[in-house]
């Protein structure tokens, strides 16, 4: 009977240990998430954000480049269309 009592006490203590480890693991996980957000905040403070004028200038450059490539593509398309029509019509 004493052996059964010891086994029961051992099982109870193991369960308590397991629960303690689970709680500790959960706390560690929460600590990791909190640390990640703190690190994220510190990194965002280090970022050098562009000024409004820099954003405007860069946007103008991008828009001009888009227009240039669109015009180039249009002209290239028209040139191929002209060549295709010339080839089909058979005119010299």
Image (cartoon, grey):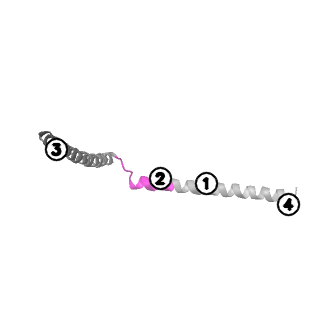
Residue identifier under label 1 = 69
Q: Secondary structure at mark 3?
A: helix
C-alpha span from label 2 to label 4 = 46 Å
Q: Pointer 1 and pointer 3: residues touching (CB < 8 Å)?
A: no
Q: CA distance from mark 3 to mark 4?
A: 99 Å
Numbered badge on residue 8: 3
Viewer-nearest of discs 2 and 4: 4
Pointer 1 or 3: first along the chain: 3
The residue labelled by disc 2 is 58
Q: Earlier in the sequence, mark 1 or mark 4?
A: 1
Q: Residue 91: where, in percent of width, then height?
A: 87, 58
Residue at disc 1, secondary structure = helix
| In front: label 3 or label 4 | 3
Write the residue at 69% across / 56% down: 75
Give the dominant element type of the magenta stretch: helix, strand or loop.
helix
Identify the residue at horizontal 39%, vertical 56% (top origin).
52
Q: Position of residue 18 (x, y in %)?
A: 22, 44
Marked residue nearer the N-terminal end (2 or 4): 2
Q: Are marks 1 and 4 in contact (CB under 8 Å)?
A: no
- Report if the CB atoms under discs 2 and 1 are less than 8 Å apart: no
Give the residue number, with chain letter if any, for mark 4: 89
Category of crowding for the residue at label 2, using alpha-carbon neighbours closer than 10 angstroms: few (below 14), some (14–19), many (at least 20): few
- Mark sitting earlier along the chain (3/2): 3
The mark closer to the camera, 3 or 2, is 3
| Residue 19 vs residue 75, the one in the foreground | 19
């Amino acid at each position: 009977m004493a052996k059964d009592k010891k086994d029961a006490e051992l099982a109870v203590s193991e369960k308590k240990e397991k629960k303690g480890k689970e709680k500790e693991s959960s706390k560690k996980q929460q600590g990791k998430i909190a640390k990640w957000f703190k690190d994220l905040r510190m990194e965002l403070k280090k970022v050098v954000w562009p000024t409004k004028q820099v954003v405007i200038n860069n946007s103008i450059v991008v828009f001009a480049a888009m227009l240039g490539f669109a015009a180039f593509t249009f002209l290239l398309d028209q040139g191929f269309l002209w060549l295709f029509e010339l080839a089909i019509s058979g005119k010299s």
